[in-house]
Image (tube, grey):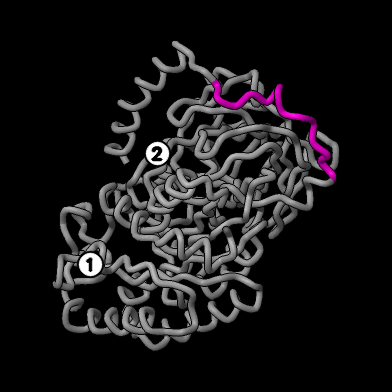
Amino acid sequence: MKLLLNALGLLAASALLGACLGGADSTDSSSTPRLDLREVQANMVGVWSTAPYGPYPLGPLTQENIPLPGAPELASFPGDQAVNRSFRMIINPTLGGQAVRLRLSNLVGTQPVRFENISIAKGNPLLPNIDESTRVPLTVNGRDFGVAMPGQELITDVAEFAFNSQEDLAITFHVAGESGPMTWHAVSFGPQYISPHNSGDVTRDSLGTSFSQVSVGWFFLSGLDAFNPQTKGAIVAIGDSITDGFLQVLNQRWTDRLAMRLNAQNANVAVLNQGINSNTVTAARSGFAGPPLLERFRRDVLEQPGVKGVIIFEGTNDLGAGVKAEPVIQAYQQLIQQARSNGLCVFMGTIPPRADVAFGWLPDGPIVKEPERQKINTWIRSTPLIDGVVDFDEVLALPGIPLPNAALFIPDLLHPNSLGFTAMGDEVNIDALLTRCNLN
């Protein structure tokens, strides 16, 4: 945790200098014609998402007492709930738009949560300040508040808001009263800002000084949908910590790299990241790892606005927990059938090699678990049930040897480093993805 925060601190200093000096805004919303929001409503596409679970503080690394990002050490929540306090969450949408609506989740809550004075603005990835001139209030049924019932998602009205692809945005809202158990995404791998316990509604603080507590988790936020007349649709990448972006701060995930490549080609396709650290395909784990992929696939993939395809990349944690190849492959087949029944194309990522101790591979991995990994990858590469393969195994392994290429991994030899994530994002065949998912 301290290593991550120290790194963020160095970056924040340069960000503060940039904020003081100012800069040009490439989006001129004043030149955009007024939109017919009723027409826009039917053409919204998800441009940013995260998989909700919990309740706080339940999440990867928090339950295992590992001193790494994800442990809620700075933001303090007496009673593990929010009481009359404000949140400023920083997100980085993979595609730009002209109008937005926000999704706030009370998925694991046991009582209604009242959200007040929700807004969106141009933000700063390392500081809680916002560009007040860009701030747009987000109403719910025309009101300045909305209530998310237990197990439900609150969706705001559509509002005009112009923004660019992969531009940092700040979502601000106040939680009135007591929230009860909080839905969150435990590891954002970037700072998120919260006002102190019982500090009241400070949502109009554009400088951000009232948001004095920091977390590395997204609270309540589950997605941002946008209207862009050029948008073809969205691809969901669903997986575990390698998709979630383990230890890679400020949007260095393989999905961010893929989005960058798509934007460079003006593909107008969004990438939605639905990774959860420690997640499994089967029910090999529960609780801190979030619901297994079989349980969350409908919500986290099929129900995402504008989704046209999915990249399924998960299974290494099943192997680490001792699950054999056959149950994982059977689960894949169920997921593929669900995707096909809902008109989605399906790509799959092969499982990379690993040589870790802390997360369950060694000591028996090379003899017991490695043959199961090879069985899964052989099936993925040969099955006619899918539209394409992203061979993460090949790109992250030593040439001709089923071991991790240490140059592409952090020292745990399970999670890629920034070079590894870049290589993964480059491994996706964009032409095949766009063609087979009808996104041209």
Q: Amino acid at mark 2?
A: Leu
Question: Label 1 crowding class (10 Å Cα cut-off): few <14, some 14-19, many 20+?
Answer: many
Q: Which residue is mark 2?
A: 250
Q: Amino acid at mark 1?
A: Arg
Q: Position of residue 163 (x, y in %)?
A: 60, 33
Residue lying at 59% horizontally and 74% vertically, measured from the top left: 339
* Marked residue nearer the N-terminal end (1 or 2): 2
Residue lying at 80% horizontally and 31% vertically, measured from the top left: 34
Residue lying at 28% horizontally and 68% vertically, measured from the top left: 393
Magenta-highlighted residues: 25-38
Question: Label 2 crowding class (10 Å Cα cut-off): few <14, some 14-19, many 20+?
Answer: some
Using the rendered view, name the quadrant where residue 295 is placed. bottom right
Residue closest to the far top:
21
Q: State the SS at label 1.
A: loop
In the image, residue 124 sits, relative to residue 150, either above or below, namely above
Quadrant location of the C terminus? bottom right
Residue lying at 25% horizontally and 68% vertically, measured from the top left: 394
Does the magenta run of residues contain 36? Answer: yes
Quadrant location of the N terminus? top left
Q: Position of residue 162 (x, y in %)?
A: 65, 32
Q: Which residue is mark 1?
A: 354
Q: Are marks 1 and 2 in contact (CB under 8 Å)?
A: no
In the image, residue 336 sits, relative to residue 152, either above or below, namely below
Seen in the image, is 126 located left or right of residue 397? right
